[in-house]
Amino acid sequence: MDESVDAPGRDDGPPGLDLGGLRTLLDRERPGLVAGPLTGRLIEGGRSNLTYAVGDGVHRWVVRRPPLGHVLATAHDMTREFTVISALHATPVPVPEAILLCDDTAVTGAPFYVMEYVDGVPYRSATELAPIGPERTRRVALALVDTLVDLHAVDPAAVGLAEFGRPDGFLERQLRRWGKQLAASRSRDLPGIDELAAALAARLPQSPAPTVVHGDYRLDNVLVGPDDTVRAVLDWEMSTLGDPLTDLGLLAMYSDRLPVKDSPVSNTREAPGHPDASELIERYATRSGRDVSQVAWYTAFAYFKLAVILEGIHYRFTLGQTVGAGFDRLGALTPVFIDQGLSALGTGR
């Protein structure tokens, strides 16, 4: 993360973060960790959980907490994120060190956790990738695939994650879950979304052996180092045990060309040198040995899931419960993702 935390913040911290309460907790639970007064700032770019860079003038950390206001059931689970990065820290999957989990909402208004601050760049758009050139862009995109293969190669039982999820019936439950998420935030007519959900349910593929699934795997959820390797995988709020091809479908979706100019949703496909989705899928298949013949279903499911997420964020925006810029544009993208999902299944409107 390249945001500085050296500039002083307000005594009580940015919205959603009480620096005084955080300092008191850290001094009690991790005595000696903090060397001076804490300053902090919201890291812009996130659309779900809030992420803050915090420092004491010598050390830096990151704090993650749920969004302000409207919170969907089962979403924004701080314990889940903390558990999975703790378990994966000793594996080939690069994750920040987990420092502290707090479920006491009195400290800063919501459950949160503290983790190591990792230097690196989260490339969020083709514009951000373009300056590093085609060769480096290609290396970064391929490194993203290779890291996903490494994640899916982890034995969940060997790292204490055997009970992290319920793989049986995973895809059916995912469809039900996202249907419920949609219902919780549905405040307007969304043509085609019910058709997409029904088509997905009618064409459920047979899942391969379960793995740890990230649930939101894309380039701007990792930090890339100057050597173009992935230094840390972030944002594990949707992680579980389940079908690994859901991660691949999401990555393929983010590697599609969107029919939207200057989309506020992360999409790096237009950067010179960026491999197309088919090449990334083939690399994953070769390195993992998995059958990817049904990847179109998983890509369509990714479009459905993103449509629901966008609608949930749009709903919070209409209630004035978002922090940061760019939320006003997301509602217009929901119909685009619905249509892309239908097209991926061959049932475009």
Image: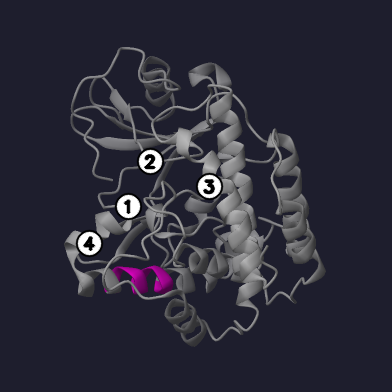
Real-space CA distance between mark 3 and mark 4, rounded to the nearest whole angstrom: 24 Å
Query: Taking 190 as reference, is 41 above or below it?
Result: above
Residue segment shown in magenta: 139-146
Question: Under tag 2, what secondary structure?
Answer: loop
Q: CA distance from mark 4 to mark 1?
A: 13 Å
Q: In the image, what residue occupies the spot 66% across and 35% down?
A: 72
Tell us which disc is closer to us: 3 or 1: 3
Q: Amino acid at mark 4?
A: Ala
Mark in front: 1 vs 2: 2
* Disc 1: CA contacts within 10 A as few (<14), some (14-19) or many (>=20): many
Q: Nearer the viewer, residue 249 or 50?
A: 249
Confirm or deny contact between disc 4 and disc 1 (CB under 8 A). no
Q: Earlier in the sequence, mark 3 or mark 2?
A: 2
Q: Which residue is mark 3?
A: 333
Seen at 77% across and 65% down, the residue is 199
The amino acid type of the residue labelled 2 equals: Gly
How packed mark 4 is, by other alpha carbons closer than 10 Å (few <14, some 14-19, many 20 or more), is some
Q: Main secondary structure of the magenta part?
A: helix
Query: In the rendered structure, does residue 144 fall within the stretch colored magenta?
Result: yes
The first of marks 1 and 2 along the sequence is: 2
Residue that numbered label 2 is attached to = 45
Q: CA distance from mark 1 to mark 2?
A: 9 Å
Residue 157 can be seen, yes or no? no
Residue 132: % across, % down: 18, 63
In the rendered image, residue 174, in percent from the top left (x then y), is placed at 72, 56
Q: CA distance from mark 4 to mark 2?
A: 18 Å
Q: Quadrant of residue 207?
A: bottom right
Q: Amino acid at mark 3?
A: Leu
Instruction: Identify the residue shown where x is 36% and y is 56%.
Output: 232
- Identify the amino acid type marked 1: Pro
* Residue at image coords 46%, 74%: 277
Verify whether residue 239 appears in magenta: no
